[in-house]
Amino acid sequence: MRPVLLIDFGSTYTKVTAVDLETEELLGTAQSWTTVQTDIGEGLAKAVAILEEKTGPLNFEARYACSSAAGGLRMITSGLVPELTAEAAKQASLGAGAKIRGVYSFELTEDDIEDIDEEAPDIFLLVGGTDGGNKECILHNAEMLATCKSDFPIVIAGNRSAARACARRLEGRDVHIVENVMPRFGVLNIKPAQDEIRQIFLKRIVEAKGYTKAQELIDNIAMPTPSAMMQAMKLLAEGCENPDGTKEKGIGDLLAVDVGGATTDIYSVCDGMPTDMNTVFKGLPEPYIKRTVEGDIGMRYSIHGIEEAVGTAYVSKLSGIPEQRCRELIDYLGSHTEVIPQGENEDELKHLDFALASGAIKTAVTRHAGRIEEVYTMNGLAYMQSGKDLREVKQIVVTGGSLIHTERTGDIASAALTDPADPYSLKPREAEVWVDRSYILAAMGLLSAYEPAIALRIMKKELKKEQQ
């Protein structure tokens, strides 16, 4: 036996997953409260103790971790034009596993600086201008950031002609210069910024958030949890090479949905560009692996965001609960975020959670997917596409408590599919549903950094296809 422990330090729970590299089997999972305010090792030790009650004592060959605790990786970005460099900065940050706390366009103001100081982000991503293009905006913003009272690393990923000048204006601060996120108009180059952001997270943020207290219990904190999820999705979609040179196949292009208590994260792994000769693309090209985070959509902390997005009537119709009662229950759950369907109101809360989870997916996937619009040209009717075309995606992967602890997972996941009432949305037409019943996706993304083929085979074994 070659057991390995995979740890996810979450904001609420520390989750542990044990796998055997020799047999390529999942040995067990467990969780306990995250104790980041005292010693994060306490919560980890409790989770491991719960795990070993199921598995028996394990002599772990290695212990690897990812983290979203203590607010995760909180970032603010600024760019020039909202639809271009500012959007490129946002995509770079989300792809690095960050939680976006602010996106600024054009020149920063004194009020903006006060807001940035109040937020005190973990990292600031400063971009603006194509290479050889506009310098004034990014130079102005560097000067403004130099006046910030709070201290945070600044990654400069804008016009290369102004990068060194920006760094000089920020002398005395922790500054990192990388390649421009948009070197030419309409061209995305976000990987260098993402790699640098992850390195800063590992070297500075982890230490600042108290993980050094747990260093004797783990070998390495490898990445933010959302990055682990992205790695898992990429691996599951694309497959990888085995040590003997053969190919371990993935399942193909996919859409993944993670519905949480505070946010709903959506991941897509596909090209998503127009395939019809009569359709042209508008805006920045979409990243092949895309992540969006809906901070106003969640099953408890952001429950009112779901109600506002889909309407109380939608929740009432799906749940079969009168609208007034829906409002009462939603208000209650919003202030009692720990409540789960059990006790005398179990059935009622199950019906409500079914409707809320469906509304969360419907809203979040619609925002994530692209859209088309009709345009009339000299040659007749044509179509303009913005965002990603997911219509041909055939696989949907779902995780999150409201989706894995229910018998109606397939029905909820169907909210991610094309809605006849919204024919211009580019959501999937039809798809198989894979369910992360054992809650292992982040752990497998983490394992993929060390043993990708084993991680992929465990995912294909553990993810359960929902019967349609």
Image: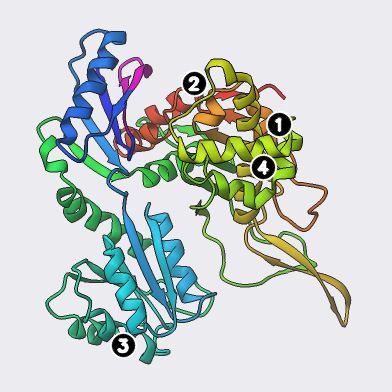
Give the Cα distance between marks 3 and 4: 42 Å
Give the Cα distance between marks 4 and 1: 18 Å
Residue 6: in sight, yes or no? yes
Q: Quadrant of residue 454?
A: top left
Q: Secondary structure at mark 2?
A: helix
Residue designated by label 3: 139
Check disc 1: other Cα within 10 Å, few if <14, some if 14-19, many if 20+.
Answer: many
- The answer to which of marks 1 and 3 sits earlier in the sequence is 3
Q: Secondary structure at mark 1?
A: helix
Query: Which kind of residue does numbered mark 2 sit on?
Result: Lys
Q: Quadrant of the N terminus?
A: top left
Residue designated by label 2: 461
Q: Secondary structure at mark 4?
A: helix
Above or below, 228 against 147 in this view is: above
Going 23% across and 83% down the picture, which residue do you hit?
164
Q: What's the magenta region? A: 13-30
Mark 2 vs mark 3, foreground winner is: 3
Q: Is residue 356 magenta?
A: no
Query: Which kind of residue does numbered mark 1 sit on?
Result: Ser
Q: Is residue 335 left or right of residue 320?
A: left
- The answer to which of marks 3 and 4 sits earlier in the sequence is 3
- The answer to which of marks 2 and 3 sits earlier in the sequence is 3
Give the Cα distance between marks 2 and 4: 24 Å
Residue 189: in sight, yes or no? no
Mark 1 vs mark 3, foreground winner is: 1
Q: Is residue 185 left or right of residue 162?
A: right
Q: Indicate the position of residue 72 as horizontal and vertical percent values.
A: 32, 49
Q: Is residue 29 magenta?
A: yes
Q: Is residue 11 left or right of residue 428?
A: left
Residue designated by label 1: 319
Q: Main secondary structure of the magenta part?
A: strand
